[in-house]
Amino acid sequence: MDRRQILKVAGFAATGGLTGLTGCSSSSAGGDGNTDSGETGNTNSSSNGETNTILMITEGSEYYFDPIGLFVESGETITFENDSGGHSATAYQEGTGSASVTRIPDGAEAWDSGVLSQPNATFEYTFETAGTYDYFCTPHKSLGMVGRVVVNEPGGPAEGSMPQDGDVPESQTIVDQRTVSYSDFSD
Ligand SMILES: [Cu+2]
């Protein structure tokens, strides 16, 4: 408990420091203060114009991934970062986590981060196979905490329907917009 408190304070201080240096820079994620990847920062190359980070958020009684839709190109890595609460990022592949259906492309490797409960804990996955990937959070699957990644172009078993547990953006919208924030999508 004490340790968590210290970590939170340290994270807050780091964020404050950064904000002070950069003024009003536009961080759409809002104060995640991610300075943990060494001197060079986050070097994941990104084709969507943003860092390839998806936050896992608890906000009151809402549980969501943000952005909820993200486009990447084959070979890019996405970092799932725990913002608040406890969450997993788990691919819909029958037999993985609590998935009973497969909604990732044929030949793609499923991932399951396990539950991340520490603030700013991260899990990385590199997307190789083109197509549409739906994923969910194990603890909040039944509450609709789901997301979608499109790699290169839409395709595979996720196309043509929404996950049973909740809605995600249409793949073409993700391709067009590169990143679809949760707030835009849930409006
Ligand atoms: Cu969750």
Image (cartoon, rainbow, N blue to C red):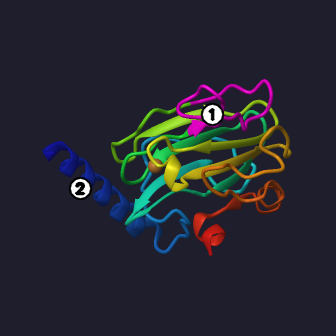
Query: Residue beneath label 2, please?
Result: 9
**Which is nearer the eye, 166 or 50?**
166
Front residue of 44 and 165:
165
Residue drawn at x 40%, y 64% as measured from the top left: 61
Give the class, few, some or many, for how many residues have Cα within 10 Å of label 2's Cα (few <14, many ≥20).
few
Rendered view: 125 above or below 55: above
Residue found at x 52% / y 47%: 141
User: Circle 1 sits on which residue?
Assistant: 100
In the image, taking residue 129 as reference, residue 182 lies left or right, namely left
Residue 100 in magenta stretch: yes
Mark 2: C-beta under 8 Å from nearest atom of ligand 1: no
Eye-nearest disc, 1 or 2? 1
The overriding secondary structure of the stretch rendered in magenta is: loop
Q: Tag 1, which secondary structure?
A: loop
Tell me which corner region of the image, top left, top right, bottom left or bottom right, holds residue 43: top right
Q: Amino acid at mark 1?
A: Ser
* Residue at the (86%, 45%) spot, across then down: 153
Residue 41 in view (yes/no): no
- Magenta segment range? 90-111
Vertical order, 162 against 88 (above or below): below
Q: Amino acid at mark 2?
A: Val
Q: Image quadrant for the N terminus?
A: top left
Label 1 neighbour load within 10 Å: few <14, some 14-19, many 20+: few
Looking at the image, residue 101 sits to the left or right of residue 21; the answer is: right
